[in-house]
Amino acid sequence: MTRPPICPLCDRPIPPGSRQSLHHLTPKLRGGKGGPTVLLHQICHDAIHVRLTETDLARDFASIEALRAHPGLAKFLAWVAKRPPGFHSRTPGPRRRR
């Protein structure tokens, strides 16, 4: 049996069939087209884009380590770590415009 991939942001497994998406570490519109991507839970991906603009991501948060160090994301990660691996809910707050 193959182990499910691990979300590099929250360190929880991503079970088959759960909501997930690829995150470009540098946004495509900011020079990241064809650049590195990471597979994240959809809720983790949404949490990034609620808190950070594309410019912020490209300039200061183009790595998992930098994302984890962001105060708002760190608080979210502590909260989501207590949830089951397939957990998903709406992420509060408006999505940033792209």
Image: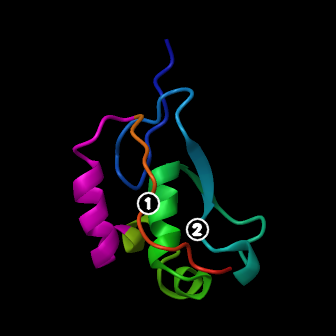
Left or right: residue 12 compared with residue 57: left
Question: Which range is magenta?
Answer: 68-85
The residue beneath circle 2 is: 25
- Residue drawn at x 56%, y 44% is 20
1 or 2: tag closer to the N-terminus: 2
Say if residue 15 shows up in the picture.
Answer: yes
Report the amino acid beneath label 1.
Thr
| Count of numbered circles on the image | 2
Q: Is residue 13 above or below residue 45?
A: above
- Location of residue 82 by image quarter: top left
Q: How is the image coloured?
A: rainbow
Residue 31, image x, y percentages: 74, 80
Q: Is residue 4 above or below residue 10?
A: above
Say if residue 63 shows up in the picture.
Answer: no
Quarter of the rendering occupied by the C terminus: bottom right
- Residue drawn at x 54%, y 26% is 16
Residue 73, image x, y percentages: 34, 69
The residue beneath circle 1 is: 91
